[in-house]
Amino acid sequence: MNFLILLPYILLGTLFAAVISLVPALHIFSVANIIVFYYLRLAGIFPGDTFPVFMMSMLVTWSIINTLPALFLGAPDESAMFIVLPGQKYMMLGKGYEAAVLSGIGALGAIIVLGLMTPVTFKIFPVIRSLLVPHMAWILTLIIAYILMSEWPKATLRPKTKLGRAIDGWKSCGAGILTFILSGILGIFIMSKPYIPIEKAFMNIVPAFVGLYALPWVITNIISKSEIPPQYISRSVSVDYNLIGRGTFAGMLGGSFAALMPVVTGGIGGLLAGHATAQKDERIFIISQGASKTAYYVGAFLLFFVPYLSHLRRGGMAWMVSPLYTAYGITDYCLALATIALSGGLGFLLLLPLSRFTINIITKFDYRIVSLVTTFIVFAMIGGMVGLRGIFVMIVAGGIGLIPVLFHSRRMNCMGVLLVPITLNMIGIGPAVVRLLGLI
């Protein structure tokens, strides 16, 4: 189709995503699920190839702007959880605006690299995919082992007795391992024991993710006694091309790995890349996580448009769009790339005023009230989409998600909800484990 015909849909997707990005705990895949669910009723609104363009522009813009709830309201999704610690440190020092800009710079860097990687995408990625496919099971097993082993004991209270020090040191580590085990059992349950109507089966994992990552943060925000300090709106950021390049490289390394590997998310890819590149500067860290998040979400969907990859489906957006649209040839890939470039540039420009808007909101309204309203929105959203059973799963997942928050372990361990059941199935023992748990 003529690009000028697609342009209004790119702008519409960008503006729509900019609005929903400001809602804490509202994940882009949840919104995309609803749009896909009602797609046939909206068919007249999305003629021709406008639907994938609209979805791509939404995804790109959300990956850039959704940093703001993670920074200022403490309700991150899984791929943003790394940016919370240094980002919220900036926020508590009154430099939250600067952290948002640094994250946006990383996202722009990732978009530029995705464009420059076009020749590699056509030639190298099909080869990489053919090499990885036979070895997915043991690679995922090694990733699980690394995640658990890297949850190192941390001492905080410094008790006087040896036993007390041992308990204190292993408290956070044990909480992380327990979180992984419990979330893994939850994942096995929801993937083997359907609990929602079949017509909404594509939303099966949504309540668990909302419970694991969004609910614990809004709950802790409500009971928190800390105050958000006044925020300084800087006119520039202290960063040079060297820092941007290093941060973008680290972020692309993790995000690209996550985009290529099944189940591996941006948070996991960011952890592996961060350890591999050993970046200590907080500015590089924030830039790399902005790049990793964009590379993961956008790069995974872009792979769906790459010729010679047999319409590779990586990431939630590709799985949702694939039954409704099929990409053919280089033209569709170039349209997707142009959409990424345009919506990415607009998304960064919108990030600046929306950051200032968010700062005004948190200075005028108690963030506990905002978090309480968010909690009602979360319950209404899950109840409306999947009913009371979905709310029950979300509450159970929320209890598991509170463990790392309360005991200061990695929230990434909640990814056991996907890693455990899918790895067990790849190894070939998934059905036996399901029978052992009495789920069939």
Image (cartoon, rainbow, N blue to C red):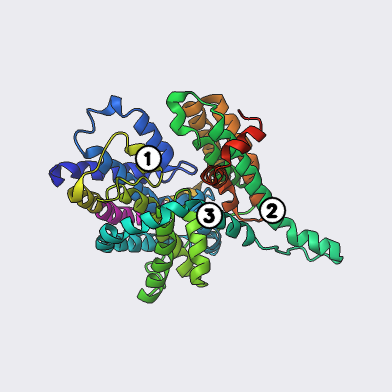
Q: Badge 1, how many Cα within 10 Å: few under 14, some, many 20+?
A: some
Q: Is residue 404 left or right of residue 98?
A: right
Vertical placement of residue 390 versus 273, above or below: above
Q: Nearer the viewer, residue 85 or 40?
A: 40
Tell me residue 387's x, y (percent): 52, 25
Q: Position of residue 390 (x, y in %)?
A: 55, 30
Please tell me which residue is depicted at 61% across the width and 38% down the height of the picture.
186
Picture quadrant where residue 7 is located: top left
User: How busy is the neighbourhood of tag 3: few (under 14 within 10 Å), some, or many (20 plus)?
Assistant: few
Measure the C-alpha gap from mark 3 to mark 2.
30 Å
- Give the residues in magenta: 340-357
Q: Is residue 110 left or right of residue 342?
A: right
Q: Amino acid at mark 1?
A: Trp
What is the magenta segment's predominant secondary structure?
helix
Closer to us: 211 or 430: 430
Q: Which quarter of the figure is the C terminus placed in?
A: top right
Label 3 sits on a secondary structure element that is helix
Q: Earlier in the sequence, mark 3 or mark 2?
A: 3
Give the amino acid type for the residue marked by disc 2 in the picture: Phe
Determine if residue 356 is in view. Answer: no
Mark closer to the chain start, 1 or 2: 1
Q: Residue 407 shows which numbered tag?
A: 2
**Alpha carbon distance from label 1 to label 3:** 24 Å
**Can residue 155 be seen?**
yes
Residue that label 3 marks: 138
CA–CA distance in space, label 1 to label 2: 35 Å
Q: Position of residue 13 (x, y in %)?
A: 29, 42
User: Residue flagged by tag 3: what amino acid is it?
Assistant: Trp
| Residue position marked by numbered label 1 in the rendering | 319
Regarding mark 2 in the picture, which secondary structure is present there? helix
- Tell me which label, 1 or 3, sits earlier in the chain: 3
User: Where's residue 219, x and y in %?
Assistant: 61, 42
